[in-house]
Amino acid sequence: MKPVDVAIVGFGWTGAIMAKEMTETGLSVVALERGVYRDTYPDGAYPKTIDELEYQQRFKLFQNIAKSSFTFRRKMADTAIPYRQIAMFKPGEGVGGAGLHWSGCHWRILPEELRMRSHYEERYGKKFIPADMTLQDWGVSYEELEPYFDFGEKMMGTSGTAYRVGGKVVDAKGNPFEANRSDAFPLPAQKEQYQSALFRKAAEEAGFHPFTLPSANASAPYVNQYGCQMGPCTFCGFCSGYACYNYSKASPNVNILPALRQTPLFELRTECNVLRIELDDSKKKATGVTYVDGRGDTVFQPATIVIASTFAYNNARLFLLSGIGKPYDPVSGSGVVGRNVAFQMMATVNAFFEPGKNINGFIGAGGNGVAIDDFNGDHFDHGPLGFVGGSPIWSNPAGSKPISGIPVPPGTPKWGRQWKTAVKDSYLNTMSFDAHGANMVYRDVYVDLDPTYKDAFGQPLLRFTFDWKDNDIRMSRYVTDQAVKIAHNLNPKAINVTVKQVGDAPDLRSYQTTHWAGGVAMGMDPGTSVLNRYLQSWDVHNVFAVGSGVFAQGIGYNPTGAAVALAYWSARAIREDYLKDPRPLVNA
């Protein structure tokens, strides 16, 4: 196989960004995607794309777990069992990855989350963080990332209302808790649906500070800096789990791939399952990647630089299979690959009204809605509460579907005439909002290679050792209590609260989010991180990794915005520094 300058493993948001950035420098790039080719046509062609049965119930855009899955256990002494049916989370597969089926919630990370250990120790003292919680600083500041957040929002055509730009308040309707911005959103906020307006009023009555969610669902026609075009969102309600038929939801397929097609320096190969990154005899330099193509042939692709851009935890698996970095050992606390894995803490409040309210929940957009940040990050005093972390609360009416969008009030039978009546009465007369909380990182929560189960290529599956922790549940229950206050201000006939109880086990059968993070954490200490602050491997300097797997711990927001900004940050370091003198960019 002809050598290339850069081999990219995985073609979702971060893989597409790195491909665009590398080709702009004149480098030849090949992107290897294990799934099939997907694009806005035919995958986003109306009306077939709004088929809930095909896309949401039969998981058309999601990973084929018959070929490769994962195993789970709660404790190290337990036997892990395979994840056999997509339910708890929904990893994407194919060109665009999860960036094709995501909803469009486009957040920035909070400044204190990037230096979480330092921040908590400075404000609450070193003893406040539990001993088993492995928090660490990320090694990069919000101020350093801000230009890349701004660039990412312009690339995605993000709609929103900025509160503070250049240190000055520009719109009181924005989020008063957000960090300073260098520029406003490229598009104005989307129109506000009825249930979001109800949420805003009820939140204000509770003394909170509601604002419009930043949404990568375009509020107007838009052309980004790559010349890629978007159309205005029509609130069809088919965002999360679907390819947008109106070119309104940002995706790698809409916002980057059309530009990449214009350069002969870029090649996209699909149905290429990368087995490992190959190293030279010194084990300090990558020589390329080995993959199995769609015909079943094993291929070696030589490359000068290798960028791992698989979904979240899969970067950890790729590093483990390739012998890059020391595997994490939770007993001794040594090693780094597989360490600091996090998910998210979800709680939901449903409010039910008498027939005639006509909230029309079928009208929706994936990233649209109204939120409060009063209990996110460290925007409130954690001292007397005794837990680390926080959560935004939001009403995010993404569109109630005919099959899945049928919540019923508490006490409703599971089947029969009464159930049918409740479904009919509730469909137009119910609304929900979520506490979308941070999940911290712990010494005994990690991923490694399963000793028993293998994928279709004979390689070990990734094994999760994961459990909910009391700290995160206490946080979620506290924030959910605040959400219930908002619900009571709506004066519904009934309220249903779904929140975790202390001691609850992770339920692989019930959807949580798809927002995994960690496994190849970034940082300033090679003893606790896999990557340096530029997302470069400490051990193999021509290997970089991008995506939410680089997060040092979980965050309150959705991870896409932070993953995108970090990819641009890493690409800048490669373009402006590494290519001039290939070497470790940070001394270990």
Image (cartoon, rainbow, N blue to C red):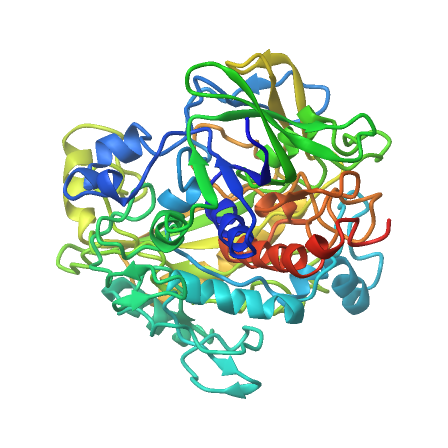
Q: Is residue 197 left or right of residue 236?
A: right
> Looking at the image, how many numbered discs can be counted on the residues?
0
Asked if residue 549 lies left or right of residue 207, the reply is right
Please tell me which residue is depicted at 77% across the width and 32% down the height of the picture: 328
Residue at 35% in and 72% down? 187
Please give left or right for residue 282 compared with residue 560 in the image: right
Identify which residue, 307 or 443, lies in the foreground: 307
Q: Quadrant of the N terminus?
A: top right
Up-down relation of residue 238 to residue 168 (above or below): above
Residue 442 lies, with reference to residue 447, above or below; the image says below
Q: Is residue 442 above or below residue 523?
A: above
Where residue 153 appears, x then y in whole percent?
A: 45, 65
The answer to which of 393 and 552 lies nearer the viewer is: 552
Say which quarter of the image contains residue 363: bottom left
Confirm whether residue 73 shows in the render. Answer: no
- The percent coordinates of residue 226 (x first, y second) are 40, 61
Q: Looking at this view, is 151 or 263 the one in front? A: 263
Vertical order, 213 against 521 (above or below): below
In the rendered image, residue 379, in percent from the top left (x then y), is placed at 61, 69
Residue 330 visible from this viewpoint? yes
